[in-house]
Amino acid sequence: QSLLCFAPALWNGKDPILKERLFGLTNREGNHGEDVKESYHYLASTPTHSYARALYRYPQQVFPYEELRKQNKARGYGDPEFELEDTGLFDDGRYFSMEVEYAKASAEDTVIRLHLTNHGPESASLHVLAQWWFRNTWAWGKTFEHPVKRPEIQRLPDGQVVADCAGLGSYHLETELRSPSEGPTWLFTENETNTELLYGTAHPQNILHVKDAFHRCVVNGRIEAVNPEESGTKTAAWFRLDLEPGETQILRLRMRPPGSASTSTSSFQDECDSIVRERRREHDEFYSVVLAAQKDPEARRVAEQAYAGLLWSKQFYHYILEEWLKGDPSQPLPPPGHATHRNEDWHHFFAHDIFSMPDSWEYPWFAAWDLAFHMVPMADIDPDFAKQQLLLLLREWYLHPNGQLPAYEWNFNDVNPPVHAWSVWRVYKISGEPGRRDTEFLERAFQKLLMNFTWWVNRKDPQGNHIFSGGFLGLDNIGVFDRSKPLPGGGQLEQADATAWMASYCLNMLSMAMELAQTRPAYEDIASKFFEHFVAISDAILEMGENGLWNEADGFYYDLLRIKDESTPMRIRSMVGLLPLCAVAVLDQEQ
């Protein structure tokens, strides 16, 4: 639930701010839209996250925030993007790299190693802050997550740093000791907004030490910004490193419950290194089995990093719509119309789960069809998680009572391609050999997908002619109109891709019904129903003349614009016209 969080922060001694988060451009700033402007790589992860590794590169000179904004905003759609590497800041290796490793000694005991390297030709200094904080669950009033007691991180008289939370228990936050000049120096503050800086008003609870205190202390030299009593809801172990050219220094950290202290006589450093080595060995052993068929070492490394990217993009997602619409009890009232704003008819939506996100920077929110695609490769390494994710969106606190799947955070009511059934069927087949597959998972998903299929037929076949429309349903974003909104003039756009998706949906449901019918004969009738529906859609899309979407002369499928009694094919050669080729299935004659 992300109650106690960890993240490193860096400062090269020249930037105006700490480097705490990845920088990127907004949709209007980038010449190709939203675009992260950093150099980082996900290198490794096991499905259980018992071992994970990533790499970040940080310039030794001032980070060019404004130059990246200015250069990209001045470029057009046809121009290449201006990247961080184009600034010349990485020339001659004038950057630091930070490789972070996470290794679990147990489910609640995590070792962290930060490898800091100076790649430049000259010695350079680097400030490193190992930050822990409690996610703010207390400032909003009596909401679902409001804690019984405010959590606290404090330094005890014996020097130990302990994080205590009523719903989580206690954790010791440990670091190896270095020289007095290198640190660490422990800093403490509250994970509370600096209202004076943002809004020009004092904090409503008169909190003196706020969340940007570490920036003001380290960058601005204002030691009074941090809490001298060494307690709060946010802490950092502050290290100051002097690195020679090519030198790497390793910082070792650990967070664990107090009762899990080791009885080993090994030093803190040796014990941490031993845990990391063991978890990394298990990681390598696991992927040697998963990727056994891949003999090319370079291709295998690419595959490992691709799986790492998938696993690193998980996120705890907390969004209770009822509370969001009402506003937070202890905060200013939401603006007028907020309660009738987006997603207003999804009062049942209650998200408090781990989700596989489309991307950890550009798309850090769930998207139903992205999730469906991602779970197919996920099933190769963690079939249980893949099945859990697919069932999650079908649960009653996500799926609308009318059968609609929530599309994505910005607009649950939008429509994305109905690929959930395809993913369920693929994951089912990947997860086991025939005769040993999880039919309970398949049946649970199938029952809810019946509701979703019915929603599609009732809502997205406006003419009742088995031709579908409405929503963002393409793979290439090409379109004369915004298909998520009503057409100007009251027309109707009948879509080749929407119709193809529904034909494919029929075939996926047919395949699942036939599989279930092998042990549950009642599904035979449902299988024949989906076969009949597929034939009806196929006949409709192939119909010649003004009613179908197939153009015999061009040999292509086109969307059809209907305004009153006139029909106009939208003759755009794109993926829209190729998707009908995907609506195929192979039936086993023995079934």
Image (cartoon, helix red, strand yellow):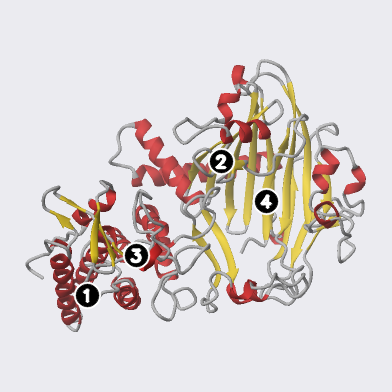
Q: Which residue is mark 4?
A: 6
Towards the viewer: 306 or 291: 306
Q: Which residue is mark 1?
A: 516
User: Residue visible at 85% across and 57% down?
Assistant: 231
- Label number found at residue 420: 3
**Which of the two discs, 4 and 2, labels the residue nearer the N terminus?**
4
- Looking at the rendered structure, the kind of residue marked 3 is His
Where does the image place residue 329, in percent across and percent down from the top left?
Answer: 75, 75
Q: Quadrant of residue 548?
A: bottom left
Mark-to-mark CA distance, 4 and 2: 22 Å
- Looking at the rendered structure, the kind of residue marked 1 is Leu
Q: Nearer the viewer, mark 2 or mark 1?
A: 2
- Label number found at residue 380: none
Callout 4: helix, strand or loop?
A: strand
User: Residue visible at 40% across and 36% down?
Assistant: 302
**Which of the two discs, 4 and 1, labels the residue nearer the N terminus?**
4
